[in-house]
């Protein structure tokens, strides 16, 4: 069933829609857990149907037309991955799916793949909504043959707090009778579970129903959670059931627990619909695991710093290899990224597929470059490398843009603007209660001076051996996405960039812990350890205080990593970290 052409797949979906009386059906990027990171390929419905490989977007299929909606990050990659004869490619920032369909249209949807907040927005836009009993994509796809995965206990030496302690703290802060926790990273953090065999995010894909009055959690998942260490950590506080039992479990718990808390912005609408059908009172509130997960405890913060030292060793080895080997292709560098991190036995997978782009391919931002456009890294220009690793004591995410040969004056001008933007935010001091939205412009201002900007947020939260993208905080000009205040212990990325289509792309990214500054104020403290490429800078465009920040950062990189590297790489790193 899986070897159909895109045209055949679209035809099969339309046939299933017709049988269900659907005039339009939406296929989101989201899976049944509203997760960016997939349990298996069987969750990649948007990719299977359209060929689009981005981590955000949606498609709408009608009987006689279809469209894929993407944001500016994926505009280039969408045009290379999607058959324009089958799908219209729409910039969702200019035309939303509801506008494309038209008010009054009936839109079919899978209630597991959309939140109540999303559906409410469609309804406000004038669409009529129809929940499907069978997802037409799943019907067309057929048997997906999903693999069995196995969880491990995330030990106290990494987690800092035990399962019972976390459940007690959760229940103490909630007035409702029960909570449905549906985000895999929240479930995994609460129950100290990880699945190292999964690529990208080692999370348990399942749902946790919390009986607050009993202080008990029932986990619904098809992941094998039977390891002795897990059962010992669970004790009598956690029961495990199969994913197929969640409906029966929800109904059973709601017989005694009438007041429920659900995060309508992150939970599948199915949960609210099912509970309300049972007569339960359902209240929206932010997932109560969100803040304790985001604000890393002392053990987690120590792990983050330690894992970033090991990751820094891998990064420097990688940058040295690229700088000294000639004629590598972008694909070969992607493999090199993975191979060098894999030399460290504590790194069990990557936190996202590596992104490598030379010159014009660097402008793909977050898209994967198709094979026919792969370049050999030679001549003059800029090479962008965005990568990260997963460790039991941390998650990493770093981007460096390297000078290859002699970058042009325009490249150096843009690179310097990005470097200055990064520095401006990295050294910011701000009052407690400040949101990422209030700080985003600090990074953009130096770029605006040169006539540059970028279409993505300046930064995102990062999990702890969890998702590389973690809420609730972001650095973004989009107020609703970045309204939450930054707090001590949150791990944030800072990653401004410049992307000039058909020319080059630049992004410079570090991770930073939010730490106390003086009474009532906070600042960012770098945990990423890797040199920025001074050879791509136009130093005449930098102020002395900006150079001072860069020199201090490079001195820290050299002092920390020098004892852990062989002499030939130390010599290279010493030159890369020399003061400007």
Image: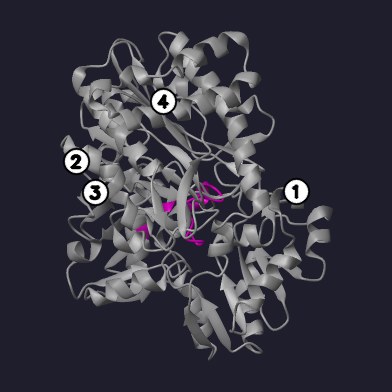
Q: Which residues are magenta?
A: 27-45
Q: Which mark is residue 509?
A: none
Estimate the spatial distance between the alpha carbons at disc 3 and disc 4, rounded to whole Å: 41 Å
- Near mark 2 (Cα within 10 A), the count class, few <14, some 14-19 or many ≥20, is some
- Near mark 4 (Cα within 10 A), the count class, few <14, some 14-19 or many ≥20, is many
Does label 4 or label 1 sit earlier along the sequence?
A: 1
Does label 3 or label 2 sit earlier along the sequence?
A: 3
Estimate the spatial distance between the alpha carbons at disc 3 and disc 1, rounded to whole Å: 50 Å
Q: Which mark is residue 87?
A: 3
Tell me the residue that label 2 is attached to: 448
Does label 2 or label 1 sit earlier along the sequence?
A: 1
274 or 399, nearer to the observer: 399
Residue 266: x percent and y percent? 46, 66
Front: mark 3 or 2: 2
Does label 3 or label 4 sit earlier along the sequence?
A: 3
Estimate the spatial distance between the alpha carbons at disc 4 and disc 2, rounded to whole Å: 21 Å
Front: mark 4 or 1: 4
Tell me the SS state at disc 1.
Answer: helix
Tell me the residue that label 4 is attached to: 532
242 or 190, nearer to the observer: 190
Q: Is residue 40 magenta?
A: yes
- Near mark 3 (Cα within 10 A), the count class, few <14, some 14-19 or many ≥20, is some
Residue 527: x percent and y percent? 53, 38
Q: Is residue 181 above or below residue 417?
A: below
Q: Residue 542 vs residue 56: left or right?
A: left
Does label 4 or label 2 sit earlier along the sequence?
A: 2
Query: Quadrant location of residue 96?
Result: bottom left
Query: Farthest residue in the front direction?
Result: 519
Tell me the residue that label 1 is attached to: 157
Front: mark 2 or 1: 2
Query: Quadrant location of residue 121?
Result: bottom left
Q: Residue 149 vs residue 103: left or right?
A: right
């Amino acid at each position: 069933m899986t070897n159909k052409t895109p045209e055949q797949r679209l035809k099969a979906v339309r046939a299933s829609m017709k049988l269900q009386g659907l005039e339009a059906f939406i296929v989101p990027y989201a899976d049944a857990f509203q997760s960016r990171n997939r349990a298996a390929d069987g969750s990649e419905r948007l990719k299977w149907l359209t060929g689009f490989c981005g981590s955000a977007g949606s498609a709408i299929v009608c009987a006689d037309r279809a469209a894929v909606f993407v944001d500016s990050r994926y505009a280039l990659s969408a045009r290379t991955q999607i058959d324009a004869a089958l799908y219209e490619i729409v910039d969702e920032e200019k035309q939303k799916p509801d506008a494309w369909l038209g008010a009054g249209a009936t839109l079919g949807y899978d209630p597991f793949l959309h939140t109540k907040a999303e559906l409410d927005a469609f309804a406000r836009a004038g669409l009529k909504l129809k929940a499907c009993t069978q997802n037409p994509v799943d019907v067309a796809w057929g048997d997906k043959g999903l693999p069995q995965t196995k969880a491990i206990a995330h030990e106290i030496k990494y987690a800092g707090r035990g399962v019972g302690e976390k459940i007690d703290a959760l229940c103490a802060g909630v007035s409702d009778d029960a909570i449905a926790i549906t985000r895999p990273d929240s479930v995994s953090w609460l129950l100290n579970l990880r699945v190292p065999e999964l690529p990208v995010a080692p999370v348990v894909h399942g749902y946790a129903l919390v009986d607050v009055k009993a202080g008990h959690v029932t986990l619904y998942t098809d992941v094998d959670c039977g390891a002795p260490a897990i059962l010992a950590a669970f004790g009598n506080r956690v029961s495990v059931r199969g994913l197929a039992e969640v409906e029966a479990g929800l109904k059973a718990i709601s017989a005694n627990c009438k007041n429920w808390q659900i995060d309508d912005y992150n939970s599948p609408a199915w949960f609210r619909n099912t509970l309300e059908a049972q007569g339960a009172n359902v209240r929206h509130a932010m997932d109560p695991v969100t803040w304790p997960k985001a604000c890393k405890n002392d053990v987690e913060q120590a792990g983050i710093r330690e894992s970033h030292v090991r990751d820094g060793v891998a990064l420097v080895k990688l940058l040295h290899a690229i700088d000294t080997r000639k004629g590598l292709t972008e694909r070969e560098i992607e493999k090199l990224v993975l191979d060098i991190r894999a030399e460290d036995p504590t790194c069990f997978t990557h936190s996202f597929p590596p992104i490598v782009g030379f010159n014009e391919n660097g402008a793909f931002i977050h898209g994967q470059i198709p094979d026919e456009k792969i370049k050999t890294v030679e001549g003059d220009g800029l090479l962008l490398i965005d990568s990260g690793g997963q460790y039991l004591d941390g998650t990493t995410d770093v981007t460096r843009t390297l000078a290859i040969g002699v970058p042009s004056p325009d490249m150096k001008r843009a690179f310097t603007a990005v470097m200055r933007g990064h520095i401006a935010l990295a050294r910011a001091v701000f009052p407690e209660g400040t949101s990422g939205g209030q700080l985003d412009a600090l990074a953009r201002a130096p770029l605006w001076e040169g006539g540059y900007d970028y279409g993505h947020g300046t930064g995102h939260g990062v999990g702890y051996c969890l998702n590389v993208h973690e809420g609730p905080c972001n650095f973004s000009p989009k107020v609703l996405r970045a309204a939450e205040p930054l707090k001590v212990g949150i791990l944030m990325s800072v990653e401004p960039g410049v992307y000039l289509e058909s020319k080059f792309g630049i992004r410079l990214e570090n991770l930073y812990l939010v730490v106390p500054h003086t009474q009532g104020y906070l600042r960012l403290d770098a945990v990423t350890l890797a040199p920025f490429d001074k050879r791509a800078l136009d130093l005449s465009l930098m102020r002395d205080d900006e150079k001072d920040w860069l020199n201090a950062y490079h001195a820290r990189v050299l002092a920390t990593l020098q004892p852990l590297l062989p002499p030939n790489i130390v010599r290279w790193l010493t030159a890369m970290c020399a003061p400007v």
